[in-house]
Amino acid sequence: MALRNAAVAAADRWVDPDDGIRYPAGEVHAWERGRNETVCGLALSKSGLGRFPHVSWADVQPESGRHAEGVQAVCRRCRAALGARRDERGWTRTNPRP
């Protein structure tokens, strides 16, 4: 399944005081419009995730997103399903074995 334009589902939200638009916050997941589950398989209704159809997946990535101020965590399974590379890990090995 290749998703090119996934939207965002998030555990929390924040409202921009300048324009009054709500944006995702907390833990974010990729969500395909028209489905009731995230890309990683969580049901939106049972897990209490809010839908943000006006925010694209690329906009909530902490390294390059423009709506990532409130994002605390990005789902690793959703990120992998949408094409994140394996070498983009958040850790590095500091003392490898001989």
Image: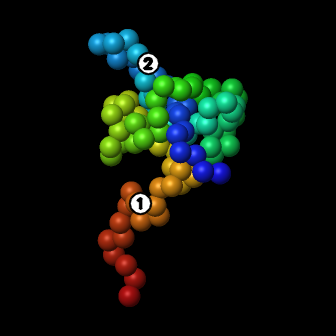
Give residue 96's position: percent from left, percent from top: 37, 78
Amino acid carrying mark 1 in the image: Arg
Q: Is residue 14 left or right of residue 12?
A: left
> What residue is pinned by disc 1?
89
Give residue 63's position: percent from left, percent from top: 33, 46
Looking at marks 2 and 1 on the same chain, the residue that comes earlier in the sequence is marked by: 2
Residue ID at (67%, 30%)? 34
Q: Residues within 10 Å of mark 2 (few under 14, many from 20)?
A: some
> What residue is pinned by disc 2?
22
Q: Residues within 10 Å of mark 1 (few under 14, many from 20)?
A: few
Mark toward the viewer: 2 or 1: 2
Give residue 10's position: percent from left, percent from top: 52, 31
> If the image is split into quadrants, where does the C terminus sit?
bottom left
Q: Residue furthest left?
A: 18
C-alpha gap between disc 2 and disc 1: 30 Å
Which secondary structure lies at badge 1? loop
